[in-house]
């Protein structure tokens, strides 16, 4: 399986959108600070993911979610979570 996921930083309230073929292992890397892209912004919390059979589908979805339209989609998809936990990206 291939996963696209969303993590809010509990430190700076920004989002990280990523891809992995092993979500558990990737989350461990984020939690332990072993990911260059996220080490300085943790701790992280997994709030959303999608699973795909084809890697190309997951990578396309990751690219979309990082776009303006994708971020708007996530704001609608996660509206109840974001009401309780506002981020700087939804303000």
Image (tube, rainbow, N blue to C red):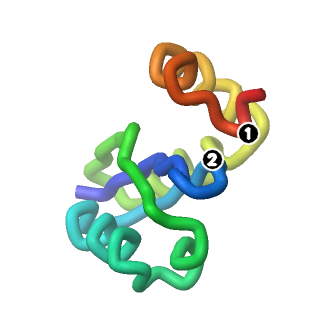
Picture residue at 70% right of the left edge, 26% below the top: 72
Secondary structure type for disc 2: loop
Q: How many marks?
A: 2
Q: Position of residue 43 (x, y in %)?
A: 45, 62
Image position of 87 (left or right of 30): right
Q: Is residue 53 above or below residue 31?
A: above
Q: Quadrant of the N terminus?
A: bottom left
Residue at the outermost front position: 11
Picture residue at 41% right of the left edge, 85% below the top: 34
Q: Position of residue 31 (x, y in %)?
A: 35, 69
Q: Is residue 42 above or below residue 10?
A: below
Q: Quadrant of the C terminus?
A: top right
Image position of 53 (left or right of 17): left
Q: Position of residue 9 (x, y in %)?
A: 54, 54
Picture residue at 73% right of the left edge, 39% below the top: 88
Picture residue at 78% right of the left edge, 37% below the top: 68
Image position of 37 (left or right of 55): right
Mark 1 vs 2, N-terminal side: 2
Q: Position of residue 77 (x, y in %)?
A: 51, 20
Q: Is residue 45 above or below residue 80?
A: below
Secondary structure type for disc 1: loop
**How far is mark 1 from mark 2, CA to CA?**
6 Å
> Is 75 or 51 nearer to us in this picture?
75
The disc at residue 22 is: none
The disc at residue 13 is: 2
Q: Which residue is mark 1?
A: 88
Q: Are marks 1 and 2 in contact (CB under 8 Å)?
A: yes
> Is 9 or 61 nearer to us in this picture?
9
């Amino acid at each position: 399986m291939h996963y696209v996921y969303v993590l809010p930083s509990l430190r700076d309230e920004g989002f990280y959108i990523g891809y992995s073929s092993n979500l558990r292992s990737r989350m461990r890397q984020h939690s332990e600070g072993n990911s260059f892209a996220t080490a300085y912004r943790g701790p992280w919390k997994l709030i959303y993911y999608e699973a795909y059979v084809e890697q190309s589908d997951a990578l396309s979805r990751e690219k979309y979610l990082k776009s303006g339209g994708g971020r708007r989609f996530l704001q609608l998809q996660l509206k109840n979570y974001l009401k309780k936990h506002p981020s700087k990206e939804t303000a």
